[in-house]
Amino acid sequence: MLKKVLGIFLATVLFVSTGYALEVAKVNVPDSISAGDSDLVLNGAGIRSKWGLKLYVGSLFLPQKNTDAQAIIVADEPMAIRLNIISGLITSEKMVTATREGFENSTGGNLEPIANEVETFIAVFNEPIQEGDAFDLVYAPAKGVEVFKNGQSAAVVGDLEFKKALFGIWLCDKPAQKSLKEGMLGM
């Protein structure tokens, strides 16, 4: 419990928000975050559900609001996706399977160029996942994607090409869920 409280405290320090823009599935989604040296605004948020069960809230943070999914995917600028786990039904195994499927969809099945990065990223989900966990996927152009679990850095992965595939999981033409994509795009 202390580890989780400490993680939440660290998330607050790393990702300072100025207030809450909205509440989605009982998750207070901040209107902005500071990730490293970048101030990012909430672009939108939505719920990932399956078979009528709410699994997580996905939020997209950008330098400025944008509804063009393809432009967001290819942009070489700071941005972040936050996943707030809202169901105890999400396990590490299910998250790994869903993430692999997401990468397949976002790359059109062409994972070879980023295969090592995908495996490094997926390893973050090997630790048990619990309701209330939060994952922040923060892209910084000179650094790659830094993955935080409950505010603690878990990995730094890839470059722009990896970021395109990762953000494509939610924003490509075959996203994890169409309504979640629309929510993240603020539509």
Image: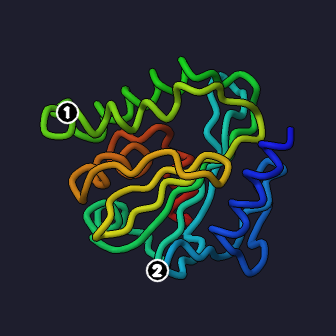
In this rendering, position of residue 110 left or right of residue 45:
left
Q: Amino acid at mark 1?
A: Leu
Residue at image point 53% right, 62% down: 60
Residue at image point 39% right, 38% down: 121
Label 2 close to label 1 by CB (< 8 Å): no
In this rendering, position of residue 173 left or right of residue 179:
left
* Mark closer to the chain start, 2 or 1: 2
* Location of residue 184 (image quadrant): bottom right
In this rendering, position of residue 38 left or right of residue 100:
right
- Residue 45: horizontal and vertical position, in percent? 62, 58
Question: In what element is the residue under mark 2?
Answer: loop
Above or below — where is 121 with respect to 72?
Answer: above
Tell me the residue that label 2 is attached to.
63
Instruction: Identify the image quadrant of the C terminus.
Output: bottom right
In this rendering, position of residue 105 left or right of residue 138:
left
Above or below — where is 83 with respect to 63?
Answer: above
Above or below — where is 95 with respect to 178?
Answer: above
Q: CA distance from mark 2 to mark 1?
A: 28 Å
Q: Amino acid at mark 2?
A: Pro
Residue at image point 59% right, 27% down: 127
Question: In what element is the residue under mark 1?
Answer: loop
